[in-house]
Image (spheres, rainbow, N blue to C red):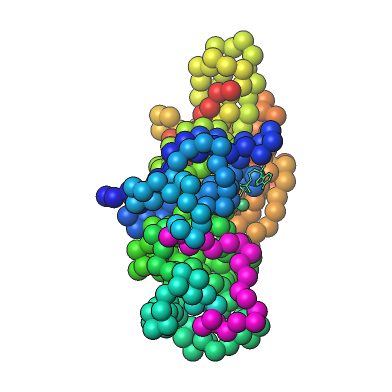
Amino acid sequence: MMVVLQTQNLCKSYGQVKALDDVNVYIEDAQLLAVIGPSGSGKTTLLRSIAGFVELDSGKILIKSKDVTNLPPEKRNVAMFFQNYALWPHMTVFENVAYGLKIRKYDKNTIRERVEWALDFLDIRSLAERKPSQLSGGQQQRVALARAIVIQPDVLLLDEPLSNLDAKIRMRIRFELKALQKRLKIPTLYVTHDQEEALSIADKIAIMHNGKVLQVGTPEEVYKNPVDLFIADFIGVNSVVKVKCAGEKLVEVGNLKLPVQKETVYVVIRAEETKVLPIQQRFDIAEGDLRLEGTIIGKLYLGSKYRYEIKIEGVDEVLFINSEEVYNVNEQVQIISRKGNFFIYEQ
Ligand SMILES: Nc1ncnc2c1ncn2[C@@H]1O[C@H](COP(=O)(O)OP(=O)(O)O)[C@@H](O)[C@H]1O
Ligand SMILES: [Mg+2]
């Protein structure tokens, strides 16, 4: 595997805010690295740094082993696709896609060849003479993508590319983008705040929080082994149980007795992997499984299932868990989470 893009100890502050705090990520070969994190965690700053639009306080950026840290954007062979991409309204689709090649001073024939290749790649050659105002949202998105890939970049940077599409189209384009990236074999850094989107398309995921990369791993690794409370809670549809235990050595959470050093124990339960059963139903749990008892205090109908709000005895936080079974408010239930589907942290 060859490392195509590497950031080394990137730091960038805006006043008191550390937008990038010692960020190290890399992309190998044609991989797609998804960078996720809540709003304000530094994702866009990371992307803009790689593209050359941010003056870093310190750190290095290497593309194909070459130090590009001090090169201007046009000297880096990097394409960036923004969340609020805009096509030039006065130019045709062809001219929009050709623009990046023109400013890089390619000759006319090469430009025509490359633009036609990009338009074919995205299946929009028939739209070449149209103006952006004559295109649907999805078509505009494709043109913008063609414009990004036409320069045959070493690295493709996508900043929440699907965030202004409606849910149905977003799902479809998500698959298309993944297939496109695999066919093009362009190393890609894909920023999103949507953990489900990241899990479904990434080869690897980097999770950012307050300018720091907290964990990097395959989707399976970060889903199954989140290294801290923040990540466990951010990935997946979770419910957090918080148990205060000042001075105690052993705290009981449901059937489990947990040794504790710190003040608070958090149990993050993957709500999507959790069973809700009637309280009297016999259920044999295995070693290491978690069993809690609680009372249904709220109920939402979601179509194929219900979302239950459940109060656990002796615990302040309520749990939110989906189930296909029908329960009534005030009913007693047991909640079973198998070993590996819940995580315990101390803070
Ligand atoms: N040009 C800027 N001037 C001042 N603060 C900025 C600037 N760009 C980003 N920030 C701040 O840096 C932090 C990270 O921002 P950003 O990288 O846009 O986060 P994200 O893309 O994850 O939402 C935020 O607190 C943001 O307000
Ligand atoms: Mg952003």
Name the residue: 40% across, 67% down.
Answer: 152
Name the residue: 61% across, 21% down.
Answer: 264
53 drawn magenta: no
- Report how many numbered discs are placed on residues in the image: 0
Any part of residue 119 in sight:
yes
Name the residue: 54% across, 63% down.
Answer: 81
The quarter of the picture where the C terminus appears is top right
Q: Position of residue 5 (x, y in %)?
A: 39, 49
Q: Is residue 280 above or below residue 265?
A: below
Q: Tell me the quarter of the picture where residue 248 sits.
A: top right
Q: Tell me the quarter of the picture where residue 176 sits.
A: bottom left
Q: Tell me the quarter of the picture where residue 310 sits.
A: top right
Residue closest to the eye, 7 or 296: 7
Q: Position of residue 217 (x, y in %)?
A: 41, 43
Taken as a whole, is the magenta stretch helix, strand or loop?
A: loop
Name the residue: 65% across, 59% down.
Answer: 302
Q: Is residue 79 above or below residue 6?
A: below
Any part of residue 43 in sight:
no
Residue closest to the eye, 309 or 9: 9
Report whether 43 appears left or right of 219. right
82 drawn magenta: yes
Q: Position of residue 335 (x, y in %)?
A: 56, 38
Q: Position of residue 70 (x, y in %)?
A: 48, 47
Range covered by the magenta-colored residues: 77-95
